[in-house]
Image (cartoon, rainbow, N blue to C red):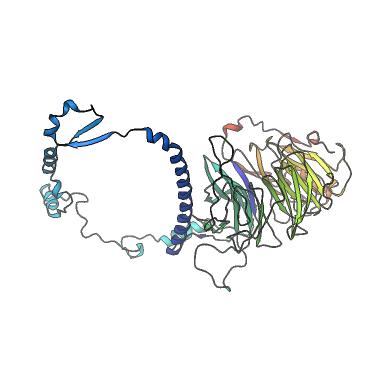
Amino acid sequence: MISALAWVPKGAAREVPERFRMSDEDYATIRATVDARLGAASADAADAGAAITSSTSIGSSLRKPRKTATVDPESAKNEVSDNGLDGTSVIVHDANADADFVKEFDMDNYSSDDDEGMEAQDDVGGGSALFSSLKGLTVHASNSDDPYVTLDDKVNEDEDMEELMVGPEDNLLLTAKTEDNVSHIEVHLYEGGEDNLFVHHDIMLPSFPLCLEWFNFPVKSFFGKPEAAADAPTTGNFVAVGTFEPEIEVWNLDVVDSVFPDAILGAEAGQPRQPAVALGKGKKKRKLKEPNDAHHVDAVLCLAWNRAHPSLLASGSADTTVKLWDLSRPDRALRSFRPHRQKVQALAWNTAQPEVLASGAYDKRACVFDTRTPDAIGSFKLSADVEVIKWDPFHPERLFVSTEDGIVRCFDARKPASDPLFTIHAHDAAVSAMDLSPNVAGLLVTGAADKKCKVWSIGEAAGSTTSSSDESPSLRCLLTRDLGLGKVFSATFAPDPGSCLLAVGGSRGSLTVWNLEGNPTVRAFIRDSGLSAAASGEAATEPQEFTVVDAGPDEDDEDDDGGMDDGDDDAMDAE
């Protein structure tokens, strides 16, 4: 399944990526990190073992140990009749049998080298036995010193890296994917000119990925030699990954074959362990995780990078906290906020006021607050738990919130606790995917657990505070598609100017790049609205609508109906 998606803008990736190489210092860094984690795990295991020992001490004291004795064979013959009467087992040891075994197989000379005997045996056999002697074997430190090795490893490696070249008009598309309990990030290369999509390289993950966030701030890596200030890069190509673990891993996308993240936000090395606290009266005890200001203590459910302040990354967790990280100092959080009482599911920075952060959680509330003065929190009540939160890029005061009951609401963030400007009954299941086009005003896309993906026109409604009827052109569904992806978990627009590319992923593990310009209905809406000259549809050739990387059929989605319907106004009910 694909649980999260993220685009990399054109020109952000290095043209020719480098291959990961580890030095002795890198091995030492990994060893220290692993030892710290193993130490913490051993301490937890010791605590659990102590608890088990104390609970079973009474039962073990009632059990009588069985006695074992070793006697001489001759004396044992006279005591056979008494064996077992007092609960004693007699083990008879025959020393003469051991001596015969050593003599028969010449065990005294077992480890001695007898090259001369072996060579003599070879000569008797009329030839040299295979691998009978390694004398005269020459070992070279490098293949370049070996006269019998004619292939140049450097040439082969350069050819392999050339196949991984990223052109200036190519996009990288990241998918958080899990197959057969193995989780990884697949880095796809999308060649828009040829409508070609394939896996460029992948990154293995230790835990199930829940969210991805791309950023270009140059994070200082654990590995390699420190660079001088003059040589330090000003931008990078990184992805932050939130998983079921409380740490946030940061990976360099310009390096292939990486085995360890470049940075870990909130690593608990050196932090005091939380004591185990028993809750409830049952036999099963659970560990109480108390939130703190330094790092998360539960799964990281959402991430949001601040493009106006590139060193800032916000994270939301199941521990009910929102944390602000300085990417130049990843050891502990810069600030910690608690605007919610339940798990924080979604975050989004405002584009016009980059200090304002919106959050949504499982307490059926959406909150808006200034991170400089977090005590002033604007709150909006909802009918169900939050799934996705997005700001309108053309109307920065408008906040879109999708919920578990299939509804999308638009609020005016300047008026806390107010009613929504409009409501869309978008799906019959949780709206787990939602995004607004950064290039076409009023173009909204939603995806849900009902396996449908819908494109909406909200152009006129985005500037209205009055209710709209079902027949109003302000709110209408342009088209509905079942893309054959199973339950839709993520849908996001490409960030490049003039682009109408939409990436969609779901429970089947397949990835689809949907060019909305290739659909006549959407193309007519764009042309008639005059909202984007770059997407006017006046190209000489009609673009291909779908580009798919198929993961094959999934047992849970054999009932997919693959239907499609353009202009499905009945699927929407505006209030």
Residue 189 is situated, as x and y percent measured from the top left of the image, at: 59, 52
Give the vertical position of 141 relative to 193 (above or below): below
Quarter of the image with the C terminus is top right
**Residue 158 vs residue 67: left or right?**
right
The one nearer the camera, 424 or 67, is 67
Q: Is residue 433 left or right of residue 139?
A: right
Residue at the extreme right: 466
Q: Is residue 156 visible?
A: yes
Q: Nearer the viewer, residue 558 or 299?
A: 299
Residue at 11% of width from left, 40% of height from top? 100
> Where in the figure is residue 419, as x and y percent of width and height?
84, 44
Q: Nearer the viewer, residue 346 or 552?
A: 346
Q: How many marks?
A: 0
Q: In the rendered image, is residue 542 in sight?
A: no
Left or right, residue 452 beside residue 29 = right
Which quadrant would residue 506 be assigned to in this image? top right
Residue sitting nearer the eye, 166 or 248: 248
Image quadrant where residue 153 sits: bottom left
Looking at the image, is 423 positioned above or below residue 217? above
x then y, percent, for residue 478: 78, 40
- Quadrant where the N terminus sits is top right
Res 512 → quadrant:
top right
**Residue 205 location (% of width, % of height):** 53, 49
